C-alpha cells in the first residue's frame, strides 16, 4: 500500500528538500541510522518524511496525524520503518517485550552517530538500553526521583521561578521561551543534581548543544555534532570533578544520592553516575521547556479555558496533563522489532523499526472525546506524552510539578498576559517546540 502523495503529503518546501539533499551528501558514518533510513527510502516516501519535518507540518501536524490514524494507522515506510498512529497500538507497542530501544539491533542500523563521545554517551544511558542493563540503571537512579524527593524540591522550584519572573516583571514584554521556559528547567536540574550556584552559567550552553545533537540527522550539521561531542566531554569532566569535591556540591542532591546508592552490593560506577547526570540534563531540559511554552501558547489561544484556570475552576494538575496530551513535547519514540510481530493481522518482521507517533495517539477519537479540543478538566486522561512501559519517563512527576508551579505563578502575576506577534515553531522532528514565544502584559 502506498500513500498517494496528494493524500498526505503535498510537496515539501524547497528548504526542506535542500536539507534532505544536503544530508544525502554526508557519509553514512556521520548521518546515523534514522537519517540514513529516511534518505534511502525511495520516492515518494522521502517526500512524506521531508513533509513531516517541514515548517508547515511542524506548526500544524494534526491534519497529517488525522489522515494517518484514519487511513494508514500502521504505515510501512520502505525499507522497514513503520509509522504507528492509533492510541491502542502505540500504547501496546510501547510496553511490548519484543521491542527494543537499542537501535544497534535494527537491520537498518548503519553506524549511529559515527562514534565519538556523544555516541558513547547515548549508548550508555538507560533510555537506549534494554533489560537487564536498563532495569539495573533505572532501579538505582529511581531513588533520586521518588514523589517525596520531588515534593522536597517544590520550594526551590517556586523560588527559581519567582526569581526569573521578578527579572521580567517591569519590562512589559518578553520572549517567554528564551527568558523563562528554556532556562528554568536547567536551573531546576542544576538544583536537583546539586550544582553550586556559581557554576550554573556553564549549563545552558551544554544543555542546548546536547539537545541539538540529539535531533534528527538530516537536520544536523557537522558543527552541531562537534559541539554536542564537546558538550558531553566538558559536562563529564565537570561532574567528575564535582563527585570528588564533596564540599562544593549541594548536600542531599541527586549527585550525592547517586554516588551513595548501593543495593545488595550493586552500585553505579563513576562513569554511570556521570552519564546519568548527562541524561537528566538532556531528557529534562527541552522537554520541560516545550511543555511550558507550548502550554502557555495553547492557553492564550483558548481564553475560556484560561479564564477557568485563572479562576481556580480547574485543578492545575488536570490542566497540565491536558496540555501534555494536546500538544506534547515528545511527538514520537522509536523501537526495534526483536522477533516477528503480529499487529492487527500485519506481520512486522524482526529487525524493522517502529515509530510510535504519540502526538497522533494523543488525539485519537477512539480514546479521547472531541480530541482536537483543549479541555483542561478532561479526566481521565490516558495520554502517552510520557510514554508507557519500562521506559516511561522517570522525570514525569518533576516535569508535572515544574509546569504547575510555573503556570500558577505566571497566571497569578501577569493577569493581562497576551501574545505579542507570531510565535515560531522549530523544525525539530522528535521534540515539538517553539523557537520563540513573544508576549506582552500591562
Ligand atoms: C514535559 C517534560 C517531559 C516529557 C514530555 C518527557 C517525555 C519522556 C518520554 C516520552 C520518555 C520515554 C522514551 C521512550 O519510551 O523511549 C522519557 C524518558 C525519560 N525521561 Fe522524560 N520527559 C520529560 C521530562 C523529564 C525530566 C524533567 C526528567 C529528569 C530530570 C526526565 C528524565 C527521563 C529519563 C531518565 C527517561 C528514561 C527512562 C527510561 O529509559 O527508563 N524527563 N521522557
Image (spheres, rainbow, N blue to C red):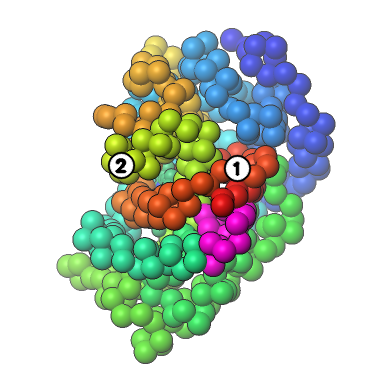
- Beta carbon of the mark 2 residue lies under 8 A of ligand 1: no
Q: Which quarter of the figure is the N terminus placed in?
A: top right
Residue 312 is marked as 2
Residue 67 in the image: above or below residue 92: above
Residue 13, x across and y down, in percent: 78, 29
Q: Position of residue 61 (x, y in %)?
A: 58, 27
Whole-percent x and y of residue 174? 62, 55
- Residue 384 disc label: none
How many marks can you see?
2
Q: Which mark is residue 419?
A: 1
Q: Residue at x 49, y 17 (%)?
A: 69
Does residue 250 appear left or right of residue 328 in this picture?
Answer: left
Membership of 347 in magenta stretch? no
CA separation in Å, label 1 and label 2: 22 Å
The residue segment tinted magenta is 167-183
Identified at 72% across, 24% down, the residue is: 47
SS for callout 1: strand
Amino acid at each position: 500500500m502506498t500513500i498517494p502523495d496528494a493524500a498526505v503529503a503535498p510537496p515539501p518546501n524547497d528548504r526542506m528538500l535542500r536539507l534532505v539533499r544536503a544530508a544525502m551528501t554526508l557519509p553514512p558514518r556521520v548521518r546515523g541510522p534514522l537519517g540514513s533510513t529516511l534518505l534511502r527510502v525511495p520516492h515518494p516516501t522521502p517526500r512524506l518524511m521531508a513533509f513531516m519535518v517541514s515548517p508547515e507540518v511542524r506548526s500544524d501536524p494534526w491534519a497529517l496525524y488525522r489522515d494517518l490514524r484514519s487511513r494508514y494507522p500502521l504505515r510501512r515506510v520502505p525499507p522497514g520503518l513503520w509509522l504507528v498512529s492509533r492510541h491502542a497500538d502505540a500504547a501496546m507497542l510501547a510496553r511490548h517485550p519484543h521491542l527494543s530501544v537499542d537501535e544497534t539491533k535494527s537491520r537498518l542500523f548503519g553506524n549511529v552517530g559515527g562514534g565519538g563521545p556523544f555516541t558513547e554517551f547515548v549508548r550508555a544511558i538507560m533510555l537506549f538500553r534494554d533489560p537487564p542493563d536498563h532495569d539495573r540503571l533505572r532501579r538505582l537512579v529511581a531513588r533520586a526521583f521518588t514523589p517525596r524527593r520531588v515534593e522536597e524540591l517544590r520550594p526551590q522550584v517556586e523560588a527559581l521561578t519567582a526569581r526569573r519572573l521578578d527579572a521580567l516583571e517591569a519590562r512589559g514584554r518578553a520572549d517567554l521561551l528564551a527568558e523563562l521556559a528554556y532556562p528554568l528547567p536547567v536551573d531546576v536540574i542544576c538544583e536537583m543534581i546539586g550544582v553550586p550556584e556559581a557554576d550554573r552559567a556553564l549549563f545552558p550552553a551544554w544543555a542546548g548543544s546536547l539537545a541539538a545533537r540529539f535531533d534528527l540527522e538530516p537536520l544536523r550539521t557537522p558543527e552541531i555534532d562537534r559541539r554536542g561531542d564537546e558538550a558531553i566531554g566538558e559536562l563529564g569532566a565537570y561532574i567528575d570533578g564535582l563527585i570528588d569535591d564533596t564540599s562544593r556540591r549541594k548536600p542531599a542532591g541527586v549527585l550525592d544520592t547517586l554516588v551513595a546508592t548501593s543495593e545488595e552490593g550493586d552500585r553505579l560506577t563513576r562513569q554511570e553516575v556521570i552519564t546519568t547526570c548527562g541524561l537528566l540534563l538532556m531528557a529534562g531540559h527541552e522537554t520541560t521547556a516545550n511543555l511550558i511554552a507550548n502550554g502557555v501558547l495553547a492557553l492564550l489561544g483558548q481564553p475560556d479555558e484560561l479564564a477557568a484556570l485563572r479562576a481556580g475552576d480547574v485543578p492545575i494538575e488536570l490542566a497540565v496533563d491536558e496540555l501534555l496530551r494536546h500538544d506534547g513535547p515528545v511527538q514520537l519514540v522509536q523501537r526495534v522489532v526483536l522477533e516477528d510481530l503480529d499487529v492487527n493481522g500485519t506481520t512486522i518482521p524482526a529487525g524493522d523499526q517502529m515509530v510510535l507517533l504519540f502526538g497522533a495517539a494523543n488525539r485519537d477519537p477512539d480514546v479521547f472525546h472531541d480530541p482536537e479540543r483543549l479541555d483542561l478538566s478532561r479526566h481521565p486522561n490516558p495520554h502517552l506524552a510520557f510514554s508507557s512501559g519500562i521506559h516511561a519517563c522517570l522525570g514525569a512527576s518533576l516535569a508535572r510539578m515544574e509546569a504547575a508551579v510555573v503556570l500558577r505563578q505566571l497566571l497569578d502575576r501577569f493577569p493581562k498576559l497576551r501574545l505579542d506577534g507570531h510565535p515560531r515553531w522549530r523544525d525539530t522532528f522528535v521534540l515539538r517546540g517553539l523557537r520563540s514565544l513573544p508576549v506582552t502584559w500591562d
